[in-house]
């Protein structure tokens, strides 16, 4: 029989602080919000530590608490700045298409081998920078869908949007991310070698 | 007949839900004849893969991407845990 683990709050910050902070940063893109949620996570964990079963690891337990806090944060943001009508009406990348919906210049060839890209820390940094450049509603929808892997029904509840609108938001987020990477990475790195 | 603009929207939608058969066929047909939309599809796939990689990097090696929590913030949090 496994002895229930005994959480030791005095070591939490040193042991899990960086991990939880990076986890929150990737999803929130906001340093002070990420710090606050890490702090709230530890405080919630402290008051709930008797309920820690020891069935999962301490870090899994803490991340589980943090995930809920992140979803709450998104809910709050969606309430404070709901999606405006023109968020949905205007095309995010209007110069890409002509009046009949054909590409004007089309996406450029990114070339190379994607597997090499993922190993480049600078590319990953550029990616997170592009994600930070999206409006909060777009970035949060993309984060829930792609980083958290949530299904669209859950995301609609968190962001309080209809499914049809969510598809438009996700389309826009991807289109803007693609454009940002093309402008800030692929065009610059042409001829840079792999 | 689907335009490129329609197809980009449908390609994104197909990453979140399954498209009705008619639209699915329309998109596939369009991709056979339009190299830009085919390229767009590959680039969206690359974006998705990049995110997978970011998440995986977070789980292995404790995640070393991005800055750690600052010492100031750590101290602040330690204090709040001592006097909750």
Image (cartoon, rainbow, N blue to C red):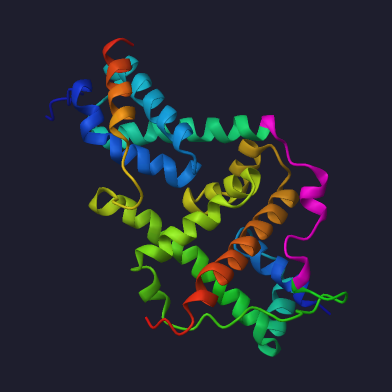
Residue that lies at the very extreme toward the right in this rendered image: A99
For image coordinates 47% across by 44% down, the residue present is: A27
Residue B76 found in image quarter: top left
Provide residue A102's location: percent of width, then percent of height: 79, 79
Q: Does residue A146 lie above or below A51 as drawn?
A: below
Q: Is residue B79 magenta?
A: no
* Side (left or right) of A182 relative to A7: right
Provide residue A97's location: percent of width, then percent of height: 78, 74
Residue A62 found in image quarter: top left
The answer to whether any part of residue A57 appears in the image is: no
Which image quarter holds the C terminus of chain A?
Answer: bottom left
The answer to whether any part of residue B83 appears in the image is: yes
Residue A101 found in image quarter: bottom right
Provide residue B81's location: percent of width, then percent of height: 29, 17
* Side (left or right) of B72 relative to B37: left
Which residues fall within the magenta stretch?
A79-95
For image coordinates 51% across by 65% down, the residue present is: B47
Which image quarter holds the N terminus of chain A?
Answer: top left
For image coordinates 68% across by 30% down, the residue present is: A79
Q: Name the foreground residue: B73 vs A69.
A: B73
Residue that lies at the very extreme toward the top in this rendered image: B83
């Amino acid at each position: 029989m496994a002895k229930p683990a005994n959480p030791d709050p005095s070591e939490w910050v040193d042991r899990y602080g960086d991990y939880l902070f990076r986890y929150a940063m990737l999803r929130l893109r906001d340093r002070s919000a990420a710090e606050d949620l890490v702090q709230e996570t530890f405080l919630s964990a402290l008051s709930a530590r008797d309920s820690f079963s020891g069935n999962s690891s301490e870090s899994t337990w803490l991340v589980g608490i943090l995930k809920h806090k992140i979803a709450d944060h998104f809910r709050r943001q969606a309430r404070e700045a709901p999606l405006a009508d023109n968020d949905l009406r205007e095309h995010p990348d209007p110069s890409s298409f002509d009046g009949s919906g054909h590409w004007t210049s089309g996406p450029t060839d990114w070339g190379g081998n994607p597997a090499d890209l993922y190993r480049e820390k600078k590319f990953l940094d550029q990616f997170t920078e592009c994600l930070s450049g999206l409006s909060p509603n777009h970035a949060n929808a993309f984060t829930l869908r792609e980083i958290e892997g949530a299904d669209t029904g859950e995301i609609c509840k968190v962001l309080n949007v209809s499914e049809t609108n969510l598809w438009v938001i996700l389309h826009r987020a991807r289109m803007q991310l693609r454009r940002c990477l093309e402008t800030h990475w692929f065009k610059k790195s042409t001829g840079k070698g792999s | 007949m689907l335009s490129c603009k329609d197809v980009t929207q449908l390609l994104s939608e197909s990453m979140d839900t399954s498209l009705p058969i008619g639209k699915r066929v329309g998109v596939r047909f369009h991709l056979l004849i339009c190299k830009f939309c085919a390229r767009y599809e590959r680039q969206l796939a690359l974006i998705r893969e990049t995110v997978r990689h970011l998440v995986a990097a977070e789980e292995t090696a404790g995640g070393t991407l991005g800055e750690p929590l600052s010492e100031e913030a750590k101290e602040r949090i330690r204090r709040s845990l001592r006097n909750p």
